[in-house]
Amino acid sequence: MAFRATRQQERRLIKVFQQVIKQEQLIDTGALYKAVDVQVQVTNAGLMLIDVSSMDYLKYLYERFFLLETFMNKPETKQIANEIFKDFIQEIVKKYPMTSAVKKLESLNTRIKAQIVN
């Protein structure tokens, strides 16, 4: 079972991605900007999956403007990702007895993968 980030954390990531769209001056009608959605989950192995979606042409803009790289390099994104990992670890500590939790935490290979989904 994967750990899901709170919707508040996802909304904060949406705002950061919208900043990237503004920064790259990709606002024409505003449809792409308004349709941005982000969903975040952390697998049991510690892989954080950040799925970014918007209008279907986002994937083509990504190829030209490297939007995900810019998004992932933002300090705000890193801070929010750290908060999500912290919540994930707290959930493990609450869910498992101490010895099992320690073993689980030692086996984690925390990393982040962001992708455009449509």
Image: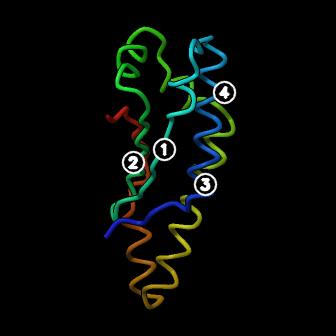
Relative placement, left or right, of 2 versus 89 is left
Which mark's residue is nearer the viewer, 4 or 2?
4
| Contact? badges 1 and 4 (CB < 8 Å) | no
> Disc 2 on helix, strand or loop?
strand
- Kindly identify the residue that appears in the image at 44 percent across and 91 percent down: 97
- Kindly identify the residue that appears in the image at 35 percent across and 25 percent down: 56
> Disc 3 on helix, strand or loop?
helix
Q: Which mark is residue 49?
A: 2
> Picture coordinates of residue 83 (x, y %)?
63, 57
**Residue that extends furthest to the bottom in the rendered view of this protein:** 97
| Contact? badges 3 and 2 (CB < 8 Å) | no
Q: Is residue 37 above or below residue 101?
A: above
| Contact? badges 1 and 3 (CB < 8 Å) | no
> Disc 4 on helix, strand or loop?
helix
Q: Which residue is mark 1?
A: 38
Which mark's residue is nearer the viewer, 3 or 2?
3
